[in-house]
């Protein structure tokens, strides 16, 4: 009986693992501070996350700030299943002129899409940013407050 339970447990874990295969993807987020003339570039793949400082001043070299290898997870699985074709190229809250300006490039399944978010909360990109923020030190977190952005969108109507 013990052997049967062990075999069934192994079978369940093995079959769950097959359903959570992570499809290769690359999601690049450019989070710029134009007033300080720099951009932080976040490159998230199904395998790792890398953050690079990109200076906007002539002669300034890019430098890698943070890199981490990622283990398969439910969140990565969910990100790998985002339908790139369903994403719009531009999301904005026209009632706010300044503020959060984020550019995202999403490569998956031989498709590439560039998405600009202007003071707008988009749930798929929000999931990616939440994952990035949970994987990085505080100083590299991307401001993308769901509550504030959704309230701004609601107040704009």
Image (cartoon, rainbow, N blue to C red):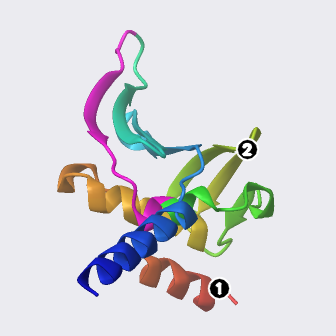
Residue occupying image coordinates x 37% and y 56%: 132
* Vertical side of 151 occupied by 96: above or below: above
* Highlighted magenta segment, given as a residue range: 59-76
- The residue that mark 2 highlights is 109
The quadrant of the picture occupied by the N terminus is: bottom left
Q: Residues under labels 1 and 2: Cα distance?
A: 36 Å
**Which residue lies at the image location 60% right of the left edge and 50% below the top edge?**
23
Q: Does the magenta run of residues contain 64?
A: yes
In the foreground, 39 or 138: 138
The disc at residue 156 is 1
Q: In the image, residue 73 lies at what x, y percent? A: 39, 61
For residue 17, side relative to residue 139 (left or right): right
81 to 59, vertically: above or below: below
Report crowding for label 2: few under 14, some 14 to 19, many 20 or more residues within 10 A (C-alpha): few
User: Between residues 73 and 136, which one lies in front from this camera angle?
Assistant: 73
Residue 150 sits above or below residue 118 on the image: below
Residue appearing at x 44%, y 75% in the figure: 12
- Residue extending farthest to the right is 85
Instruction: Identify which residue, 4 or 14, lies in the foreground.
Output: 4
């Amino acid at each position: 009986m013990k052997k049967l339970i062990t075999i069934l447990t192994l079978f369940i874990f093995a079959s769950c693992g097959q359903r959570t295969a992570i499809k290769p993807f690359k999601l690049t987020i450019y989070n710029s501070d134009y007033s300080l003339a720099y951009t932080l570039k976040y490159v998230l793949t199904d395998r790792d996350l890398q953050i690079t400082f990109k200076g906007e001043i002539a002669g300034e070299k890019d430098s890698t700030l943070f890199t981490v290898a990622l283990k398969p997870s439910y969140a990565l699985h969910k990100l790998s299943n985002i339908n790139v074709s369903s994403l719009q190229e531009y999301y904005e809250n026209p009632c706010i002129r300044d503020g959060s300006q984020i550019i995202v490039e999403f490569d998956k399944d031989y498709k590439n899409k560039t998405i600009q978010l202007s003071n707008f909360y988009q749930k798929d990109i929000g999931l990616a940013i939440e994952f990035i923020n949970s994987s990085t030190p505080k100083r590299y977190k991307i401001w993308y407050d769901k509550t504030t952005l959704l309230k701004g969108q609601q107040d704009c109507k």
